Image: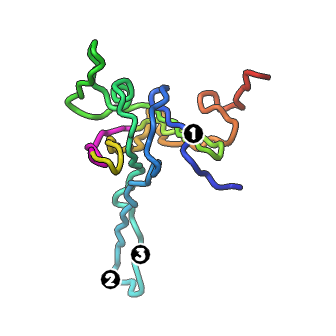
Amino acid sequence: MKAIYGLAQAKFDNKVIGWIDEQGLQPAGTAPTQLDVYAAQVKDGPVVTITSNPGKKAFTCNLIDLSTENLVSVIGGTKDVNGNWEPPEKWEKTGVMDILCDSGETIRFFNAKVTGNDFANGINSQGVLALALNIELLRNEDGKSLKIFAKGINPETGAPAVNPEG
């Protein structure tokens, strides 16, 4: 099969982050916008189309592992000596994010800006409280925003992953 599917694991800043709800990552970007330029001399359409906004690549997801350690890793804040989480003023962090897929590929976001939008799902008997995350794919210092690594390729080296069992 040539499809990419299934969220096996998500890593942010080289740390495995906890559970994301069954919806996984959902596209949330915006399409590029175009401006058609017309000329009086040309009657049957535009003479050029200019991209006025390149759009953006983004995803959303609901983080359901709300352990203190996971919250600190994903959006910041602090954990006190009793294990309580104190949120940061701005609920966002930026770093490398790897999405390991059940199909074997790894999707790397070279400069992911992860923002905690708000809580989701509510506190009730129908589901679990979650933190709704927005993940924007920004460009890194080399101009890269994402890359899909084939099955068995280590995103850190770009070479085949070494199996420790031989």
Location of mark 1 (residue):
100
Who comes first in sequence, dot 1 or dot 3? 3
* Viewer-closest of 110 and 40: 110
Report the mark closest to the observer, 1 or 3. 1
- In the image, is residue 149 part of the stretch drawn in magenta? no
Residue 65's place in the image compared with 50, above or below, is above
**Residue occupying the point 54% across, 44% down:** 7
Counting other residues with Cα less than 10 Å from the Cα at mark 1, is it few (<14), some (14-19), or many (20 or more)?
Answer: many
Location of residue 72 (image quadrant): top left
Who comes first in sequence, dot 1 or dot 2? 2
Hey, what amino acid is under mark 1?
Answer: Leu
Query: How did the renderer colour the structure?
Result: rainbow
**Residue occupying the point 32% across, 42% down:** 129
Mark 1–mark 3 contact, CB under 8 Å? no
* Viewer-closest of 148 and 10: 10
The quarter in which the N terminus is drawn is bottom right
Residue reaching furthest to the right: 166
**Residue occupying the point 26% across, 43% down:** 118
Question: How far is the residue under mark 1 from the one under mark 3?
Answer: 44 Å
**Residue occupying the point 57% across, 39% down:** 100
Q: What secondary structure is the magenta-colored segment mainly?
A: strand
Counting other residues with Cα less than 10 Å from the Cα at mark 3, is it few (<14), some (14-19), or many (20 or more)?
Answer: few
Q: Which mark is residue 40?
A: 2
Question: How far is the residue under mark 1 from the one under mark 2?
Answer: 53 Å
Residue 81's place in the image compared with 163, above or below, is above
Q: Which residues are magenta?
A: 113-123
Report the mark closest to the observer, 1 or 2. 1
Location of mark 3 (residue):
47
